Image (cartoon, rainbow, N blue to C red):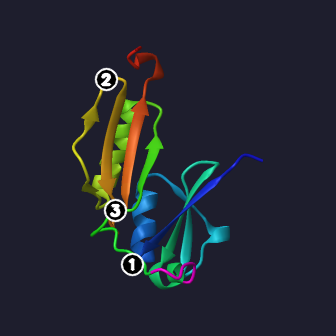
């Protein structure tokens, strides 16, 4: 079995967050979803667990941070090409995301970033390994 990653994110409004992530083209695994959590399927090996803040709090003794005020994690997802980067970023903006940083084009790497509804930062990028400058 391949190693999988489950990114756990606290959310203020689970229904709005589910609507946001499905607007990006991701699906929900109902088997791992209920009124306190939703399992967003990014790929066969990458999942985002949206957890209501009170439920998220049950997993940690630390206070739940506010991602709109401080950054602890930047989630990055590779895309197959520049058009795919543009497409998912446009879907995110249309669904209520805000621009985190301006578009970055380093020639070999192209990226856009956005804050989701709760302020979690997502960077979508395409990297052309053949275009990386040789040293």
Most foreground residue, 87 or 78: 78
Residue 13 in picture, x, y percent from top left:
40, 78
Q: Which residue is mark 3?
A: 71
Whether pointer 2 and pointer 1 mark residues with C-beta atoms closer than 8 Å, the reply is no
Of circles 3 and 1, the one toward us is: 3
Whether pointer 3 and pointer 2 mark residues with C-beta atoms closer than 8 Å, the reply is no
Residue 131 in picture, x, y percent from top left:
40, 17
Of circles 2 and 1, the one toward us is: 2
Determine the CA span between mark 3 and mark 1.
17 Å
Residue 132 lies within the magenta run? no
Q: Which residue is mark 1?
A: 12
Most foreground residue, 119 or 28: 119
- Give the magenta range: 58-62
Measuring 65% from the left and 70% from the top, which residue is drawn there? Answer: 32
Q: Which residue is mark 2?
A: 107
Q: Is residue 86 above or below residue 16?
A: above
Measuring 44% from the left and 60% from the top, which residue is drawn there? Answer: 21
Between disc 3 and disc 2, whose residue precedes? 3
């Amino acid at each position: 079995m391949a190693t999988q990653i489950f990114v756990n994110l606290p959310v203020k409004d689970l229904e709005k967050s589910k609507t946001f992530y499905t607007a990006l083209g991701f699906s929900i695994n109902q088997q791992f979803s209920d009124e306190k959590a939703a399992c967003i399927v990014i790929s066969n090996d990458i999942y985002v667990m949206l957890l209501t803040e009170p439920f998220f709090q049950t997993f940690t003794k630390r206070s739940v941070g506010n991602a709109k005020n401080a950054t602890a994690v930047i989630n990055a997802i590779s895309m197959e090409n520049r058009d795919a980067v543009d497409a998912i970023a446009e879907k995110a903006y249309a669904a209520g995301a805000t621009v985190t940083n301006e578009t970055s084009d380093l020639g070999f790497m192209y990226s856009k970033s956005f804050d989701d509804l709760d302020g979690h930062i997502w960077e979508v990028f395409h990297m052309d390994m053949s275009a990386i400058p040789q040293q």
